Amino acid sequence: MGDRQNKLLKAIVESYIKNVKPVGSKSLCEMFNCSSATIRNDMSYLEELGYLEKTHTSSGRVPSEKGYNYYVENLMKPKEITGEDFMKLQTILNNKELVLTDAINKCMEIISDITNYTSIVLGKNSNNNILKQISIIPIDNKRVVAVLVTNTGHVENKQVIIPDDISIKEIVKTCEIVNKSLVGTPLNEVLEKLEFEIKPEIAKTMAKYEELCSFFYDAFSDFKEKNEDDIFFGGKTNILKQPEYNEPEKIKEIISKLENIELVKNIETDDKEIKVYIGNENNFDPDTTVIKTSYNVNGEVGTLAIIGPKRMEYDKVVTLLNFLKNYIER
Amino acid sequence: MGDRQNKLLKAIVESYIKNVKPVGSKSLCEMFNCSSATIRNDMSYLEELGYLEKTHTSSGRVPSEKGYNYYVENLMKPKEITGEDFMKLQTILNNKELVLTDAINKCMEIISDITNYTSIVLGKNSNNNILKQISIIPIDNKRVVAVLVTNTGHVENKQVIIPDDISIKEIVKTCEIVNKSLVGTPLNEVLEKLEFEIKPEIAKTMAKYEELCSFFYDAFSDFKEKNEDDIFFGGKTNILKQPEYNEPEKIKEIISKLENIELVKNIETDDKEIKVYIGNENNFDPDTTVIKTSYNVNGEVGTLAIIGPKRMEYDKVVTLLNFLKNYIER
DNA sequence: CTTAGCACACTTTTTCTCTTAGTGCTAATT
DNA sequence: AATTAGCACTAAGAGAAAAAGTGTGCTAAG
């Protein structure tokens, strides 16, 4: 593929990203100092190679997924962040009072606002998180709250109804034992350890060890699930501002996908690089592009993702994500 | 207004609720055993009174807001809950393992599913909630987690960065003092009490009492806001299934309103009755009806709300809400 | 290799017509 | 006094046809 063809593809992709409508040969004459016929020849060559498509026999050209891919891999240049946007992000990142996850969320919210795409932060809250403390706090005669804190500062809690046959005192006492043995345990081993190591321990001092153990089992069993639900949307519906979402059908479809927690969770990645998944390459929605990467700061890991139309400002998004990722990882 | 006119208005409202299209005189002849002309006479009388409207000069009639109102106040009869729906709700409400708020949320989710309207639960977490316990849990050298539990079993937590000039030990020690004095305090008085009663107390034993106090002030200051954010959506976007949401504009508008936390919070009420706010009567969205009521169980209060089109199955929704409300309040 | 020229393809917009579902009004009927 | 039949009239909706606009492919010439 010759130099002019590369430039032409770049120009077409960028024009389409900007103007949303199929690109005709005439509109590019000036830029390339040649006639529309020449452009047309090159265009039909690029179409033959699979980089361009037509919406109907005599329409202008639109980039294919392969075309976007080629653009992302070979043609686009990182875009500079404008002063204003830079300032906004900088301000948040320099605010030492903010906890890391809050700062990340705020930044992604801003990125969503300046791009009009949807941004998502998936806190992995990984299972090698370590238990820091368990507390049982009595609420009334019937209920206690179990609070669990991890080494990354995450807090989970669950209200549990006290079974009739055990007393609060017994629970609190057992909790001390559980705490002693369980602190320092990775979260994903908690249930197992409770069953096999701590139960015998409890049995030594507590008569109703069976009931007590199943009480704690109950209290902890939800944490794992809940843990995974750590999803933050920055401007959940900003993507609706994109002109492709101009039909009820399409809007409802993307909304329902964004509401589908399972589907959103699937976006999670542990890839260190920023990866671009165009159309069918992502398993979120074939009409969108998902750009994502993971971050890892002192064992606190998560995913940053941007969802936009395939006609996405790839250069801008990649640059912004790069900036954020680099900043938070040092 | 005569008897037939009442019946006619009822029939028109119900027909429009069911079929979504303006109601013509002919379609009601059979039901009333009279000619379309007679119906038309009555219709134009009802229109004069402001209960009916036309979409254009020669269209069928549509209920006005006043008409819906009259229907709700005077004409509609509570609708029986079908066996299936009844079962679903019953199952959840009889599950003694579920904490109250979870049961309520699940029920509202089901109500949203069977009606195809959006349901919202606003946990008020009212300010007369009482502080049950504060814990400070160190995460590492720089951070602690402050955990706060209330008498209703709600847990709030915040990561706080430890200022350079105070140590974890000092914080933990101060926390003990704070705990002693603050437990039992209504949430909305916590900050005040900290400033005026506890600061002097701390000053007795701690050298850096100024810094320590402002640390705790910091840790608690968010709780109030966060507290109010306790919003649960049951089928947030179910309302989009209603035929009125068939244009991009309308869909985007309602979505953006549902995403607008402030606006949603405004729905909160402490009315004991079930109240119906039709169109302009609610300040959420003039094209919708909001039906809402509050619940109060042992001091745990909150709002139940259903948002649907003005053309809503009022009888069904009111009956369902009534059922749920009665059940949870005993 | 580039370009001018032209026929052709498809979409979009506009215009016009016809049909349909309803109304209001008047005069006759019960 | 209330009901009804009859009729003229209105607006919306559905198609069809025409017109305008945008862009292509191909051929032949530079």
Image: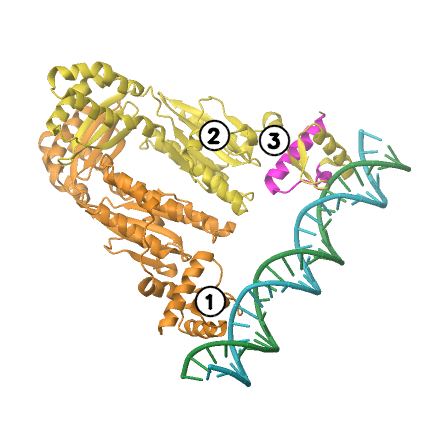
Chain colours: A yellow, B orange, C cyan, D green
Question: Is label 3 in contact with label 1 (beta carbons under 8 Å)?
Answer: no
The stretch in magenta equals: A2-31
Question: Is label 1 in contact with label 2 (beta carbons under 8 Å)?
Answer: no
Question: In the rendering, at what x and y percent does residue A127 appear?
Answer: 34, 21
Determine crowd level at label 3: few under 14, some 14-19, many 20+ residues with C-alpha closer than 10 A: many
Q: Which residue is mark 2?
A: A321
Name the image quarter holding residue B113. Answer: top left
Q: Amino acid at mark 2?
A: Leu
Name the image quarter holding residue B155. Answer: top left
B253 vs A69, left or right, is left
For residue D13, above or below residue A305? below
Secondary structure beneath dot 2 equals helix
Same subunit, labels 3 and 1: the answer reads no
A135 vs A223, left or right, is left
Q: Mark 3 or 2 closer to N-term? A: 3
Q: Which residue is mark 1?
A: B30
Q: Is residue B243 visible?
A: yes
Question: In the rendering, at what x and y percent does residue B231 appear?
Answer: 31, 43
Front position in the image: A283 or A74: A283
Q: Quadrant of the N terminus of chain A?
A: top right
Question: In the rendering, at what x and y percent does residue B188 appear?
Answer: 19, 45
Q: Amino acid at mark 1?
A: Glu
Gap in angstroms between the C-alphas marked 3 and 2: 22 Å
Q: Give the total of numbered labels.
A: 3
Determine crowd level at label 1: few under 14, some 14-19, many 20+ residues with C-alpha closer than 10 A: few
Q: Which mark is residue A65?
A: 3
Gap in angstroms between the C-alphas marked 1 and 2: 67 Å
For residue B171, above or below residue D6? above
Name the image quarter holding residue B144. Answer: top left
For residue A248, above or below residue A285? below
Q: Is residue B166 visible?
A: no
* Magenta stretch: includes residue B247: no
